[in-house]
Amino acid sequence: MPEHELALPTAWGHLAGTLTLPDSPAPWAAALLIAGSGPTDRDGNNPLLGTRIDNVKRLAHALAARGIASLRYDKRGVGASVYPGLSEDALRFEHLVDDAVALAGCLAGDDRISRIALVGHSEGALIAALAAREAQAQAVVSIAGAGSRASALMRRQMADHLPQDIIEPAFAALAALEAQQAVDDVPDALFLLFRPTVQPYLISWFRHDPPAVLAELHMPVMLVHGSADTQVGVEHAQWLHAGKPDARLEIVAGMDHLMGVGGDTRRGADVVGGAVAAWLQELDVDVAA
């Protein structure tokens, strides 16, 4: 399958990605693939994981094998998406949404592309939903997306993993950030989580409620979640579905948060790619009818 590097100039630098095309004749439906949180690159790899998983790259290949083109990209300041002078305290969640809209525009300007879906994994699922209307996408796919505000998810994870003596100040910090207020006095034990330079980003992220965002979309939505996801439990898919009852819900047996089935991301990406491609092609048939 052909792959081509893409670079989109921006006011702050440029966004870089990979366009993956099917071997079948154009035109094709296309997916903008939006990776998860942190310094995750276009292929789905994050240095914090300590190993390459290539889950987004494998999803792109699985889609191409089924006739769906895709564009995956490095987020601003990650990989080849060069952002000279990037400062953590200047980044907002909405900037990531703006980038998705801009890259969807690149796909829309390609005569070989017939329809565009925004396909987001984990944090990228919320970015996809927020970008969809401005990007004039025809569909949205959420893979392992959270069904609650990020702050609520963090609160549950903290309750399970933090020492008892710092849970109270951690919850107090979360409550302040949820109320769109900065936290001035961060305990040393919580400094990495709530350092002053990351607080503006957290505040901008916490204001978005994923089920409410989906409820405002007037386009087809697909929810894909793994039954073995311990980071964002399968109940999150149910909460998202409650916000968008007409969404297609697909629970993948044995799949974890990183799209691994039995730890195998190649297998998981192929299952997800097959389900997403079949759904997008079903939408094409409905439009043609």
Image (spheres, grey):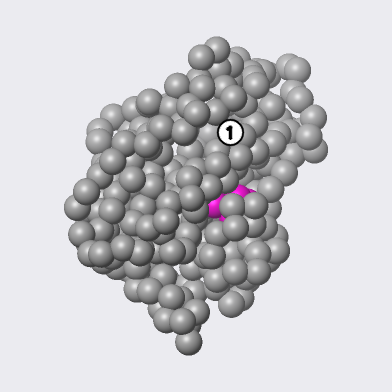
Number of marks present in the image shown? 1
Q: Amino acid at mark 1?
A: Gln
Q: Residue shown at 72%/44% (left/top)?
A: 207
Q: Residue shown at 54%/52% (left/top)?
A: 128
The percent coordinates of residue 18 (x first, y second) are 33, 41
Q: Residues within 10 Å of mark 1 (few under 14, many from 20)?
A: few
Q: Nearer the viewer, residue 274 or 154?
A: 274
* Numbered range of the magenta stretch: 127-132
> Would residue 30 be seen by someone viewing this image from the given angle?
no
Q: For residue 171, which quarter of the picture?
A: top right
The percent coordinates of residue 168 (x first, y second) are 68, 33
In the image, residue 196 sits, relative to residue 232, either above or below, namely above
> Would residue 141 appear left or right of 101 to someone viewing this image?
left
* Residue 122 highlighted magenta (yes or no): no
Mark 1: secondary structure? helix
> Would residue 152 appear left or right of 37 to someone viewing this image?
right
> Would residue 74 be seen by someone viewing this image from the given angle?
yes
Query: Which residue is outermost to the top?
Result: 85
Q: Nearer the viewer, residue 245 or 256?
A: 245
Q: For residue 40, which quarter of the picture?
A: top left
* Residue 131 highlighted magenta (yes or no): yes
Q: Residue shown at 43%/43% (left/top)?
A: 35
The percent coordinates of residue 287 (x first, y second) are 50, 79
Residue pointed to by mark 1: 164
The percent coordinates of residue 69 (x first, y second) are 34, 56
Q: Residue shown at 38%/26% (left/top)?
A: 79
